[in-house]
Image: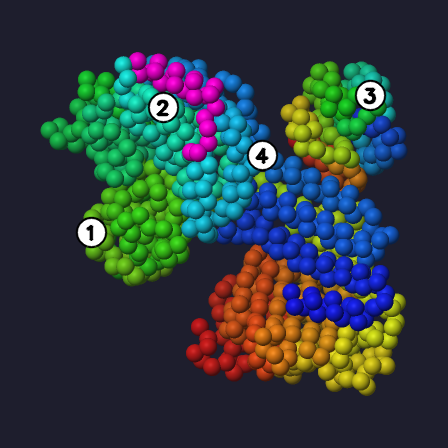
Amino acid sequence: MFSRQLFRHWTYRLFAPGVLLRERYNAFQSLLKYDDICLSLIADLEEIAFGEERADPARIVWLTRRLNVAVGHMIEELAKLSPTRHLDLPEYLKKIDFYIRMGLDQPQPDLSPPFTLPLAEAAGLLDQAGGKAANLATVATKSGLPVPPGAVVTASAFAYFLEANELPPRLGKLLRRVVLSQPAELVRLCEEMQALVLDAEMPEEIAREVAEAASRLAPDGGPLAVRSSAVGEDGASSFAGQYDSELHVAPADAVAAYQRVLAGKYGSRAVTYRILAGLSDAATPMAALIMPMVPARAAGVVYTFNPPGEECRECSAVFAVPGLGDELVSGRRTPQVFRYTRAPEPGLLAAPEPQAAVLERPVAQGLARAGMVLERLFGKPQDVEWALDARSRVAILQSRPIPDARVQDEAPAQNQGQACVLEDAELLVEGLVRGSWGAACGPAFHARDRVEPENVPRGAVLVTPTLDPDLVRLVGRVAAVVSAAGSRASHFSSVAREMGLPVVVFGPEAFEDMPAGQEFTVDATCGRIFAGRAEAVLAAAQQRRLPPGPALEQLRKVLPHISRLTLTDPQSPEFSPPFVKSLHDIVRFCHEKAVEEMFTLVGKAGSGLGKAKKLKSHLPLVMYVLDLEDGLFPAAHEAAEVTPNDFKSQPLWAFWYGLADPDVAWSDRQLHVDWEEFDRVSGGIFDPTSKLLASYAVVSANYLHLMLRFGYHFSVVDAFCGPDEHKNYVSFRFKGGGGHSEGRRLRLLFLARVLTHFGFTVETRGDLLDARHARHGEADTQKRLAELGYLLAITRLMDMGLTDESQVDRLVQEFLDKRGVPAEFSS
Amino acid sequence: MARILVLDDVSDAGELIRRILTRKGHDVDAFTEEEEALRHAAKNPPDLAILDIKLKKMTGVEVLEELKKTAPGVKVIMLTGYPTLETARESLRLGASEYCVKPIDKDELEHKVSEVLGA
């Protein structure tokens, strides 16, 4: 803020009484502010599209809305600077913005009845009944297998409920703040959203229909189950165990239980999962399934293909536990397993001893057969939930496709151990139950109870008692999970397989054998754990990244309209509004034209107060200096050209000292080579002779605003350096180049590391780096400015072919060695 | 080479598109009247129709609907200077393949036409 006030002050001194000129000068300042905001928003969006940040799709839309507004402001400010030019820019903004809005458009909610449906009528109605109910209705009507009666409360009932309570905008405001890197905030926002849903009033029409369905399904007042059946669930994304079901519900409580199921959509783990799956809130409306409870003596799942943990791809398996099945799927209980062939009449391959078995063999055989019937019905391998009542009558409760990843990606070779690479590291244990696949290494972290994600170190190997579905909140944070209990039939194992997180089940000794803080490598592909880093295993592990999901695919598709820079050469006739292709182009255009205006403004003003002067130095840098007040020695006041010896400005002098350091090679020959290299990575737009591409410094005795151009984007240094340390600061912004993203990332990494060593607070987003060093003494601030100058000089010449982090490590070390930084200063 | 029908109430705008696409080797007929365009399409079904949304009597969306009745196989690109999400959704629902917002950009138009024809 201080610099802006200062600018205003100077503005008045410079241009008074030229009010018009002063306004234009202020417009320039305002434009620079919006330029900052735009670049920052673009970086945020790039970070979501290609970086590590995972945000709710509502946030993506919101960021693009803000960006549109900020770009609009830039255009307005530019219009103040040059009112008669670039009149068509707003039209191009409207066009580009429309493509972005269209590309990110979400399905519109359907509010029309019916609000409830008999289960049998829901077959195939994925958009109305949700995946679980629609699939179960297909089972009920087409398979001949026993399914309990049921009623579906439709997705449009949910949409109507939200609209009737005017919740969509209120939920939207909270959703757009959800990012997975801030788990504590996520939990808080989710609680707020759940409270909104729970406190809302159920519209009379829906409440009446739900109550009627409940009394129809439980005429004797017996207990009901109200289960979630979200749209998008049990399809490409399983949402296994992410939504809550309400069990043992009295018919009179059915409406309240239904409302709780709706609120479950905004539970933190369900929201986390949905974001990881790349689905928007709007794309996943919540339907519900109401059924009488089956008084189960046993329950479980049938896996018709490649059953988890069974080392047999062409098998099916029946997993069974006594009582209700939720103990099994929640990962709290290790089930009994009956393994079969995949024939229409399955042949028994393995079973528990009859006297200890939860199920009689004919019953298990019947379940395996039912599984194959369902696989044929749906045309895909199935994961089937079942329950058995006291009279051994089977009920099918759910049938969903086994995730494609499990059917296709896991080659048989991996099951048969051929992919288990030889490893020199010390083997801790092998032959473990494999919850998923992949390998990762990290320090063990014990989580005996529920832990908050922010308390878990990033990249830890989580040691946990069970495979609770709640662990989804840690996906993206932990490197691997080792559980004391659970199986591959656990819901969380499904989630881990979808998300590519290594999971193994070790047994109760996990906590003792894996002391907290010690490093382990978990090889989930082969069910092994190594003490320390198992390099061969890690190298062999297929690098699986989270699949992007629909929302990110949408964003990546519109990203060219947002961030792709095509206006690169200000001297080209195509550097004009009809050629803008993206919001970034407009930002770039406005900035360039505004800077151009400022120079002509000062030139035209010619008031003798601050005509920009060309800098003459031994550096091959075209630069102009605009002296606002006392930034140059008096001898230079009347000269058209200045030299560095004329610099009176403290911060400019310090910065130049570093930039012009004799250690930096600026020789013509080397320069030529490096510029060629730079042209290669920056799109060939740099022309050193161009006046428009010049760098410039706006200075006073204690102030420096420097736009330094080494590529097609500026580095901006904004600094104050004087005797009052509270006023002193150095702000530095650097935005990437046109090179490949890895090279840009590595250069930023280098800058970030070095600047951090020099006490700067550094933040990077996408290929944007912001660094700040504030409130230090005069001498200290000068030194930082000098180091910054030197750093920019050498990164300007730094080989852009950086390809890996070890190069960066080496360069950082070299830099710190050279600049005489004490050893303890370096990492 | 494809047969392309262009319908824009401003004849200059239609003519501009006709020239751009003719240079790409297509056979292009440009119209300013809806009925005339629909009659022409009924007799000589085009491969692609480029329809402005704002017309004289009908909207481009209505023309799209009519056109799809007589020539269901025709590919359609909508064109507008006043884009709204509602018309975009409605056009896509009625079978439009693409959406082009004015001011027309030559490269963009050529690219979208070749994509739609290639699909």
Q: Which mark is residue A106?
A: 4
Q: Which residue is mark 2?
A: A254
Range drawn in magenta: A198-219
Relative to A283, is A154 above or below?
Answer: above
In the rendered structure, which amino acid carries the disc numbered 1?
A: Glu
Q: Which mark is residue A509?
A: 1
Q: Label 3: chain?
A: B
Q: Which residue is mark 3?
A: B57
Q: Measuring from the top left, give residue A410's x and y in whole percent.
A: 38, 40
Badge 4 and badge 3 both on one subunit: no
Q: Measuring from the top left, give residue A807's x and y in whole percent.
A: 51, 68
Comes first in the chain, label 2 or label 4? 4
Q: Label 2: chain?
A: A
Residue at 33% across / 21% down in the picture? A252
Badge 4 and badge 1 both on one subunit: yes
- The span from disc 4 to disc 3 (Cα, nearest Å) is 31 Å
Residue at 73% across / 42% down in the picture? A94
In the rendered structure, which amino acid carries the disc numbered 2?
A: Ala
Comes first in the chain, label 2 or label 1? 2
**Quadrant in which residue A329 is drawn:** top left
In the rendered structure, which amino acid carries the disc numbered 3?
A: Lys
Give the foreground label among 2 and 3. 2
> Looking at the magenta stretch, what is its main secondary structure?
helix
Q: Are marks 2 and 3 in contact (CB under 8 Å)?
A: no
- The span from disc 2 to disc 4 (Cα, nearest Å) is 31 Å
SS at mark 2? helix
Residue at 43% across / 46% down in the picture? A188
- The span from disc 4 to disc 1 (Cα, nearest Å) is 48 Å
SS at mark 4? loop
Q: Label 4: chain?
A: A
In the rendered structure, which amino acid carries the disc numbered 4?
A: Gln
Q: Measuring from the top left, give residue A502's x and y in whole percent.
A: 35, 48
